[in-house]
Amino acid sequence: MTASRIDQRLVNAMVWHSRYEEPAEACGLLAMDAQGSIRFVYCLTNSVEATDSFTIAPHEYFGASRHAERNGWEIAGLFHSHPSGHLIPSATDRSNAPGSDWLYVIVGTDEARIFRLVRGQFDQIGAERAS
């Protein structure tokens, strides 16, 4: 995993998706190419429509995974919003993290913070503002 920056268009897509889904948490997946660059953001459905948690609809996860595979990418992370504005991993984020090989992006109303799980701790490795 080498991405610590995300292209401005992809940051904007995550932020706009987050705004659209308010007051529920927005969520989605990140596809990475073999060189470690985030190539695509999948804005997906939070199937629980909660303000403090998310669950990606399984059929959408499968569809994103197939699309990424067809393009030579891999699903390498996820994003979700924190409608409260606190852009740090919550206790729920920590307990539900799928693994240390993924990037985790937490999105606010105008910013995305990029984290990586390292030895059980989320380390912030980047931040991008929406335009």
Image: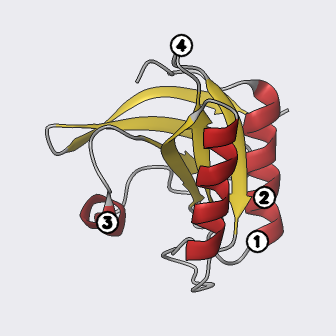
Question: Is 114 displayed left or right of 117 in the figure?
Answer: right
Which of the two marks, 1 or 4, is nearer to us in this view? Answer: 4
Question: How many C-alpha atoms fall within 10 Å of the one at disc 1: few (<14), some, or many (≥20)?
Answer: some
Which of the two marks, 3 or 4, is nearer to us in this view? Answer: 4
The answer to whether mark 3 and mark 2 are in CB contact below 8 A is no
Alpha carbon separation for disc pair 3 and 4: 27 Å
The image shows residue 101 at horizontal and vertical percentages of 32, 37
| Residue at numbered disc 4 | 35
Say if 56 sits above or below 115 in the image: below
| Residue at numbered disc 2 | 17
What amino acid type is highlighted by mark number 1? Glu
Question: How many C-alpha atoms fall within 10 Å of the one at disc 4: few (<14), some, or many (≥20)?
Answer: few
What amino acid type is highlighted by mark number 4? Gln
| Residue at numbered disc 1 | 21
The image shows residue 36 at horizontal and vertical percentages of 51, 19
- Tell me the quadrant of the picture where the C terminus can be found: top right
Q: Earlier in the sequence, mark 1 or mark 3?
A: 1
Question: How does the figure colour the protein chain or chains?
Answer: secondary structure
Which element is circle 4 on?
loop
Question: Is 99 displayed left or right of 85 in the figure?
Answer: left
Most foreground residue, 16 or 39: 39
The image shows residue 94 at horizontal and vertical percentages of 28, 59
Q: Earlier in the sequence, mark 1 or mark 4?
A: 1
Alpha carbon separation for disc pair 1 and 3: 21 Å
Alpha carbon separation for disc pair 4 and 2: 26 Å
Question: Is 74 displayed left or right of 49 in the figure?
Answer: left
Which element is circle 1 on?
helix
| Residue at numbered disc 3 | 96
What amino acid type is highlighted by mark number 2? His
